[in-house]
Amino acid sequence: MSRKVPEEEYQKTVSCRLKRWLEGAEDPFAEGMEMGRQEPVTESPEAKERREEDEKQLRQRVYDLENNVEIRIFRRFYRVFSVGFCIFLVVMLLAAVSDLPVFGHPENPVNNQVAERYIENGLQETGAVNIVTGMILDYRAFDTLGESHVLFAAACTVLILLRTDKKKEQAEDEDNDRRYEPKNDVILQTVARVLVPPIFIFGIYIILAGHLGPGGGFSGGAVIGAGLILYLNAFGFARTEKFFTAKTFRRVSFCALACYSLAKSYSFYTGANHIESIVPLGTPGAILSSGLILLLNICVGVVVAGTMYTFYAMFRKGNY
Amino acid sequence: MAFVQNFPFLSILLSLFSGPLCSILSGKWAKRVNTGVIVTTGVMSAFVLQHVISTGQSYVYQMGHFPAPWGNEIRVGILEAFMACFFCAVMLLCMLGGIREREEQIQESKQNLYYVMVNLLLCSLLALIYTNDLFTAYVFVEINTISACGLIMIRQTGRTYEAAARYMIMSLSGSGLLLLGICYLYAVTGHLLMSNIREQVQFLAQTGQHHLSLMVALGLMSVGLAMKSALYPFHTWLPDAYGYSTLSSSAILSSLVSKGYIFLLIKIFCRVVGFNVVNESKVVNVLFVFGIIGMIMGSLSAIKENNLTRMIAYSSVAQIGYIYMGLGLATEAGIVAGLYHVLSHGATKALLFVAASGLGDASGNSDRFADITGAGLRNKLAGTAFLAGSLSMVGLPMFSGFISKFFFAQAAVGHAHKMFPTVIALALSTILNAVYFMKTVIRIYTPAPEGSVGGRQIGVWEQPAKSAALVCLILLNLILGLNSDPIVRLIQRGFEMFD
């Protein structure tokens, strides 16, 4: 037996709203989301004319096709030559690959005393259960030191290229940001609320367990960076800027890289001068073991996460 | 182990550490840190040089607790220490000469990032010089490429963005080829340490195994590094990158960055592959031919140019051609001549760039030929410096350029097949050099026509830093030109230590 409900109350029930949503009469997300109108691209005839004129000018003045013999010859031969060159390169490289030792053969030159010592003595000498981590952060730590500075240099170059300091440009960026990206998207925010904490914890786990199993600073840092980017997409710059700005990035990276440089300087110095290092290796398998590797993994992780986030933030908006 | 033996490692780590440090400092403090770091590394390298000269032996420095094929190591000999010392000195002078340009052309808030890039560049150059491991070399080549890109585009005009994009594309393809070459070499030898690879390569060359992949690896590495150091057909990124970036950047890029790659290539030829194998392959002949074409084509492009800095940039193409020609001779004398030209060109090109900016200052900040008429009379020191640099590039006795041309000719004489092409190319290129440099010198000493605007007198004391840099660079040129004997002996001894 059904009960007659007044119209006003019925309007508020879930079933009514579901029905209206299915009919397309109401969009429950419409008010929560903040999004600028996306106007279709229209081009006035004058603008079109100007653009075409610009292109014509570009051809005439920059390339000067009528008088520039070099470019005329270049254009004529470019396609043929590039295809020919690519074919030559592919054939040459394939021929060289077929000449290489058979992949995975035990007698290959790569299976020499170098790899042997990494595998057989890696655990005792570095204290890291994960041999790869032991190799990149202890045996060949100098390369990895350079590699983490590559990331830092790349992030700084992006800062040079894209950071805007003028208030007007920043406001424009803010507007552009609203035009194409929905703000306060309920679905995204709900999912992010659920997902971001586990992503962070997982990333931290990968970094901290880098010397115990698969993982390490580079992969863990990438996971944390992805988490930060997801958080930024869901909640916008206003929320992330409370704890992470370009200044924070530079300070945190400096601390991490300085820590890495100093720790490794100590170990390079003692190693080269044949002084016993005071850093204990600990019990293999324990979380606090394998000498400096844990610390170095954390440093690398911090730099990688910061760099990933900086790339994203810089390409999306000139400042953060 | 003597304490001084730690200095190469300390100088690499110090410059590496100061990169991130500069990113959190203000521009002013970053500048001081940068100057301090360059001076410190230069002084440390000088001590190392003195140490290796007195012991007469090179030594390896183990980076960490594990010996070489397992861990990393760096190797220090006379040539390495000398190059490090020279690079630091030239870099300091380049930075000194461009102080005012940097302040004007770089945004206030990005000043410190410039010094981050310079410090990382210095570190990568030192590491390229000292490393004894091919993969370490690759890692620092990456740092070098990225920071050089930053140095080009920090001026933030459309021209420098375009130049940086071109530089990045060409330079990264070069890095890619270098990496491919290293991979091939690793697959056939199983080592990354230079001395171990050489043992294996010599063994493979004797037995004739994996000949094709060895040659492909050698070719890929040579072409990759030739691209990065702007050998002739790969020079298209060069004029814009050097011509439009801020003064210190163009001076550093032309006199140091490309030279770092050339030094690495010489190292690969002598220490990784072994010279007999390189000689048997035809790679050196290819480098020789393109070096000679570069000498002529670079000069021809420079003659056509009507912008002073771009003209100097095109002249770099020709000078890089000289160095590759020396390498292509594939004799010890040829390589020593090439190394001497690395020094001579490094000192002269920095001088020319700084002098050209001084001439531009006296002509209303323009470097078009039409505007610089009489600039040498308005800015006397810059005019003198430009004259000295031009004479050195043309190869007048007393200046460094003469000595390197002399050595190139000496190395070519008696060479079975390459004597005539080398000598003819040298003569032709000298004439072409004289055409465009003397044309410019005559122009800057011709009084400006009545009623021209924009020019103003500039005294020596108006920009003391630039004047000091110019004087030091002229002196450096004269030292290299007048006192070449001990320097060449040093290079020869260092080169013998390479084996």
Image (cartoon, coloured by chain):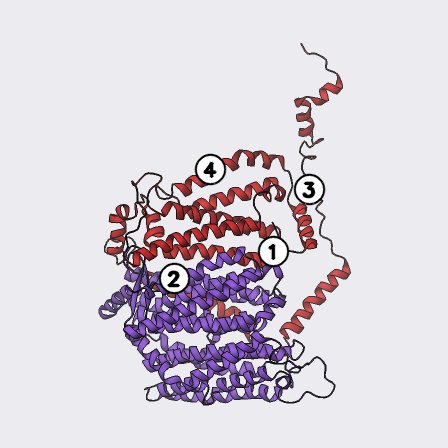
Tag 4, which secondary structure?
A: helix
**Residue A97 appears in the figure:** yes
Relative to A282, residue B6 above or below: below
- Can you tell which quarter of the image residue B449 is in? bottom right
**Residues marked 3 and 1 touching at CB (< 8 Å):** no
Q: Label 4, label 2: how many angstroms apart (C-alpha)?
A: 37 Å
Q: Nearer the viewer, mark 2 or mark 1?
A: 2
Q: Nearer the viewer, mark 3 or mark 2?
A: 2
Q: Earlier in the sequence, mark 3 or mark 1?
A: 3
Q: Which residue is mark 3?
A: A35
**Residues marked 4 and 2 touching at CB (< 8 Å):** no
Q: Which residue is mark 2?
A: B10
Q: Earlier in the sequence, mark 1 or mark 4?
A: 1
Q: Label 3, label 1: how many angstroms apart (C-alpha)?
A: 24 Å
Q: Amino acid at mark 2?
A: Leu
The percent coordinates of residue A195 (x first, y second) are: 52, 36
Q: Which residue is mark 1?
A: A163
